[in-house]
Image (tube, rainbow, N blue to C red):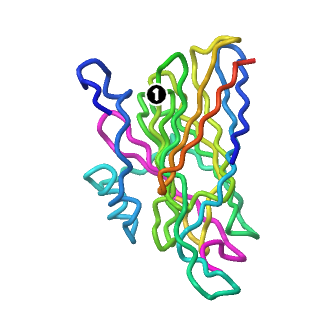
């Protein structure tokens, strides 16, 4: 689209799909591909709601909430997936630090949530045991 | 393909819940009859707009489950306002739906 960037705030400009991040085969490269840095600070202000045991790895419900002020994006990573990055949610100005979705997990692993706020990256993780993997077959 | 969406306002906060029909193929699955790999086919971008502002831009990989579910919340929506949800997949297919906030 040929829209002058000057007319829009940066939040409104649709960023291109971050191919390198989604094609990355480890967590570090996925985070670097998204943000240009993989330096994550652990945060207790991010909560991941996910099952302790997922009987079906093809459908694992994940809800992430954060009360970090100025959260700009929430990204979801399944640590042991062949391509760990599952999703990155870019929040609008009035959008709350809350997303809920369902992801596929190939095997038992940590689900990692990364929140970008004020130019810094915060993260937390939660282990999900997967009984039947949801990526191959 | 279809999009089912609900938008509900409570105390000034609008909750969006959306269910999209899409195969979300990873590209690693094999067709059981032919033994050939089923090509990757997944939604890459979902955008939700309220009054022309993007309240949510989601970038997805193939690890989002088949028939994706998405829920999020934003402030500033009023009952009767229109929210628009649209998606584009890796094959260039797209769909969109509009719903008024209830």
> Residue A100: x and y, percent?
63, 44
Circle 1 packing at 10 Å, graded few (<14), some (14-19), many (20+), is many
Q: Residue at x 68, y 69 (%)?
A: A57
Q: Quadrant of residue B78?
A: top right
Q: Eyeballing the image, is A12 above or below B80?
A: below
Q: Which residue is mark 1?
A: A92
Side of B38 relative to B8 (left or right): left
Q: Eyeballing the image, is A8 above or below B57?
A: above
Q: Residue at x 67, y 59 (%)?
A: B66
> Residue A9: x and y, percent?
32, 22
Q: How many marks?
A: 1
Kindly report the secondary structure that dominates the magenta region of the rendered protein.
strand
> Residue A64: x and y, percent?
58, 45
Give the quarter of the figure containing the N terminus of chain A. Answer: top left
* Mark 1 residue element: loop
Residue in front for this viewpoint, A20 or A60:
A20
> Residue B1: x and y, percent?
68, 48
Q: Residue at x 36, y 59 (%)?
A: A21
Side of A123 relative to B16 (left or right): left
The reply to whether the magenta stretch includes residue A116 is yes
Q: Eyeballing the image, is B100 above or below A91?
A: above
The reply to whether the magenta stretch includes residue A133 is yes
Chain of the residue displaying label 1? A
Residue in front for this viewpoint, B38 or B58:
B38
Residue in front for this viewpoint, B54 or A101:
B54
Give the quarter of the figure containing the C terminus of chain A. Answer: bottom right
Q: Which residues are magenta?
A: A112-137
Side of B2 relative to A8 (left or right): right
Q: Eyeballing the image, is A134 above or below B20?
A: below
């Amino acid at each position: 689209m040929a829209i002058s960037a000057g007319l829009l705030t940066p939040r409104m400009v649709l960023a291109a799909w971050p191919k390198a991040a989604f094609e990355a085969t480890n967590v570090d490269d996925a985070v670097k591909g998204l943000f240009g840095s993989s330096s994550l600070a652990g945060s207790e202000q991010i909560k991941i709601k996910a099952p302790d045991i997922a009987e079906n790895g093809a459908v694992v419900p994940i809800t992430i909430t954060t009360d970090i002020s100025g959260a700009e994006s929430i990204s979801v990573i399944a640590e042991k997936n062949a391509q760990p990055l599952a999703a990155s949610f870019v929040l609008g100005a009035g959008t709350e630090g809350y997303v809920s979705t369902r992801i596929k997990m190939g095997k038992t692993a940590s689900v990692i949530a990364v929140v970008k706020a004020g130019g810094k990256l915060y993260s937390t993780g939660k282990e999900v045991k997967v009984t039947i993997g949801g990526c191959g077959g | 393909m279809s999009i089912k969406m609900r938008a509900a306002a409570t105390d000034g906060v609008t909750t969006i819940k959306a269910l999209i029909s899409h195969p979300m193929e990873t590209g690693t699955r094999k067709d059981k009859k032919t033994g050939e790999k089923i090509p990757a086919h997944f939604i890459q971008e979902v955008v939700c707009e309220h009054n022309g502002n993007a309240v949510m831009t989601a970038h997805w990989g193939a690890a989002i489950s088949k028939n994706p579910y998405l829920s999020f919340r934003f402030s500033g929506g009023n009952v009767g306002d229109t929210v628009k949800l649209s998606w584009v997949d890796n094959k260039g297919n797209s769909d969109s739906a509009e719903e008024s906030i209830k």
